[in-house]
Every structure is written in structure tokens, then in C-alpha cells.
Image (cartoon, rainbow, N blue to C red):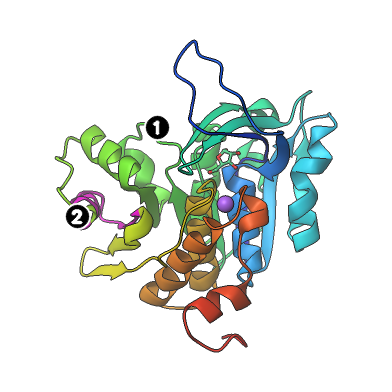
């Protein structure tokens, strides 16, 4: 089983021909309110890939909460660990341009009130996976990691968005997920030189931290360094419409495949294809593929596994 401890947001999305410069106003499309948040996104992506998923998070006492949880609920994610805390649900104001580039301003709202103790002791154990990101208070996230690790679970941290993390903080993390920018930021923060390729950067991070490090590389797929091996997998070649949540799709699907016992290379292949598919539709959660679609794109049997 996968437990996601993390953020739940409403994404307020407008499309525009090009992103505004500071001080500039540009015309936008009709706005949309779409469920998002890196935690919720990863939970839904894992669920659609076939995992049993429980969400630990917080929403506010507002009208946005129901919308924020709608896709998770429809998808069959266990929401019994979602708390109501404070007035507002997290909101991400997102602008997407014609080249599928985006900017995001995030107001955390209830996400700032999530506590490690919201992960009930005894609710996670050996063989389970805890999936974490950086949109909830980091001290609480680390304490949740410690509890899960002590219980024998696999702990996976997506360092998104990037925040400087000290070496000691990785003690209870088994696997680190980053995009190219986050990989370079983490390397610099640890006093390493970012490599000239993603593979070089993840290799030096894995050697330094003694952990498996996986980087998504956009259209170039993903690369992992385990300390022993380097594994590269391709992306699907797609015309991106909106890349919001593509990284979260990768994280959720990777966790889902690992949780069902797939090897790392297989999990990464599924995750990279799922991330590509998510780029082909607008918005985050509505664009996340079902397992059948991932298997079809991999050229395998849609009746998985
Ligand atoms: O990673 C994409 C997510 O980041 C969006 O859904 C938005 O909520 C922001 O948190
Ligand atoms: Na999308």
C-alpha cells in the first residue's frame, strides 16, 4: 500500500499566448479550477496506475476543499486521513503559455498545518511505501519519514519544489526523486558540481548521499543512479499541451510499480511514459493516465501486469 503525506491544492489555471513580464498585463483564457497539489497529484497518479493509495493531507474550511478532493475521491484514493485545518485550501495560481511553459504561485493554506502525527502510528508497516514532497512543512515531513522508516516502510522523497536540505535529513529517505533543475540545485547545495548531463549529476548525488537518486529529464526520459548501476529510460515523443503535474505523474507511477514489486527499470519505464502522456492534456489531475493507457504506450498487454 502507498501512503502519500503531502499537499492538496486547487489549481487556478489561465492560459495565455505568452507569460507576462513583471508589471505587465496579458489577456488570458477563461480560468479553470482544477484539483492539484504535488501530494494529491502523486496519490492520484499512483492510484490510476493500479496501487492502493491513502492520502494524508489537509484542506481548509472553504468551498474549494470539495473541488480539491473530487478527483481523488472519484479515483478511489482513501481520504480518511485528510484533515480540515483553518480557513483556506491551498491554492496554486498557474499560468500556462502556448509553448506549454508555466509559472506557479502557491498559497499553502491548510497544507501549512499538516502534522507528522496525522500519519497514525501503526498505519504504515513493512512492505508499504511512504511518498513525500516539499509543499508541506519539512520538519513534519521528515518526522513522518522517520516514523515510516522505523516501521520498515520504503520512503520516497520528491524534492519538489526544491528547498535546501541538509545531509542528515536524508537518513530516513530511501529514494530521492528530482527533475533536472532540482538535481542541479541539490548538487550545488551539497557542494558538488552539477554534471554536464543528468546521468552525471544523479551519479554524483547517489555516491554522495548513498541513496538511489532518480531524475526526470523532460523529453529525454529519466535516469537513475543506485550507487551500483545507472538506468536510463526514454520518454514518449509527444507534443506537449500542458506539462503541469507531469513530474508528479512520474513519482506516483514509479511508487505504484515499485510497491507492486516491479524492478527499478520497469518502474521507471512506466513512470516516464505516464509523465509523457500527462503532458498531452490540459491541467494536472485530469491528464493522468490509467494503467491500461500506460501499458498500451509501452507496447505491452493492456491487461496488466
Ligand atoms: O506539480 C504541479 C503542482 O504544483 C500543481 O498541481 C500545483 O498545485 C502545484 O502545487
Ligand atoms: Na497535463
108 versus 211 height, above or below: above
- Image location (x, y in percent) of residue 239: 46, 58
The residue that mark 2 highlights is 207
Residue 150 seen anywhere in this rendered image of the structure: no
> Ligand 1 within 8 A of label 1's CB?
no
Residue 161 seen anywhere in this rendered image of the structure: yes
Residue 244 is one of the magenta-drawn residues:
no
Q: Which residues lie in the magenta part?
A: 199-217
Q: Give the left or right position of residue 273, taking residue 69 as reference.
A: left
Quarter residue 237 falls in: bottom left
Residue 201 is one of the magenta-drawn residues:
yes
Residue drawn at (18%, 42%) of the image = 194
Nearest the viewer among 283 and 7 is 283
The residue that mark 1 highlights is 163
Residue drawn at (36%, 74%) of the image = 265
- Image location (x, y in percent) of residue 146: 49, 47
Amino acid at each position: 500500500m502507498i501512503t502519500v503525506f503531502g499537499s492538496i491544492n486547487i489549481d487556478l489555471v489561465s492560459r495565455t499566448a505568452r507569460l507576462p513580464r513583471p508589471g505587465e498585463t496579458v489577456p488570458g483564457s477563461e480560468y479553470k479550477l482544477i484539483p492539484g497539489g504535488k501530494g494529491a497529484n502523486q496519490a492520484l497518479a499512483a492510484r490510476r496506475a493500479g496501487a492502493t493509495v491513502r492520502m494524508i493531507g489537509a484542506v481548509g474550511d472553504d468551498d474549494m476543499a470539495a473541488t480539491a478532493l473530487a478527483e481523488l475521491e472519484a479515483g478511489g484514493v482513501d481520504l480518511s486521513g485528510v484533515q480540515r485545518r483553518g480557513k483556506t485550501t491551498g491554492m496554486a495560481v498557474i499560468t500556462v503559455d502556448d509553448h506549454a511553459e508555466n509559472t506557479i504561485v502557491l498559497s499553502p493554506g491548510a497544507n501549512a498545518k499538516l502534522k507528522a502525527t496525522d500519519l497514525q502510528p501503526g498505519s504504515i508497516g513493512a512492505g508499504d511505501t511512504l511518498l513525500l514532497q516539499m509543499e508541506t512543512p519539512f520538519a513534519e515531513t521528515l518526522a513522518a519519514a522517520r516514523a515510516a522508516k522505523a516501521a520498515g516502510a520504503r520512503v520516497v522523497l520528491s524534492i519538489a519544489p526544491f528547498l535546501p536540505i541538509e545531509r542528515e535529513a536524508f537518513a530516513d529517505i530511501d529514494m530521492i526523486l528530482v527533475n533536472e533543475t532540482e538535481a542541479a540545485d541539490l548538487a550545488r547545495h551539497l557542494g558538488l558540481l552539477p554534471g554536464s548531463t543528468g546521468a552525471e549529476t544523479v551519479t554524483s548525488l547517489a555516491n554522495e548521499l548513498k541513496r538511489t537518486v532518480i531524475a526526470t529529464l523532460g523529453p529525454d526520459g529519466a535516469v537513475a543512479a543506485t550507487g551500483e548501476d545507472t538506468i536510463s529510460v526514454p520518454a514518449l515523443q509527444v507534443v506537449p499541451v500542458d506539462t503541469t503535474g507531469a513530474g508528479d505523474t512520474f513519482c506516483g507511477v514509479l511508487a505504484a510499480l515499485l510497491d507492486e514489486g516491479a524492478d527499478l527499470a520497469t518502474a521507471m519505464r512506466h513512470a516516464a511514459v505516464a509523465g509523457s502522456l500527462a503532458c498531452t492534456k490540459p491541467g494536472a489531475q485530469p491528464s493522468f493516465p490509467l494503467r491500461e493507457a500506460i501499458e498500451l504506450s509501452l507496447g505491452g498487454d493492456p491487461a496488466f501486469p
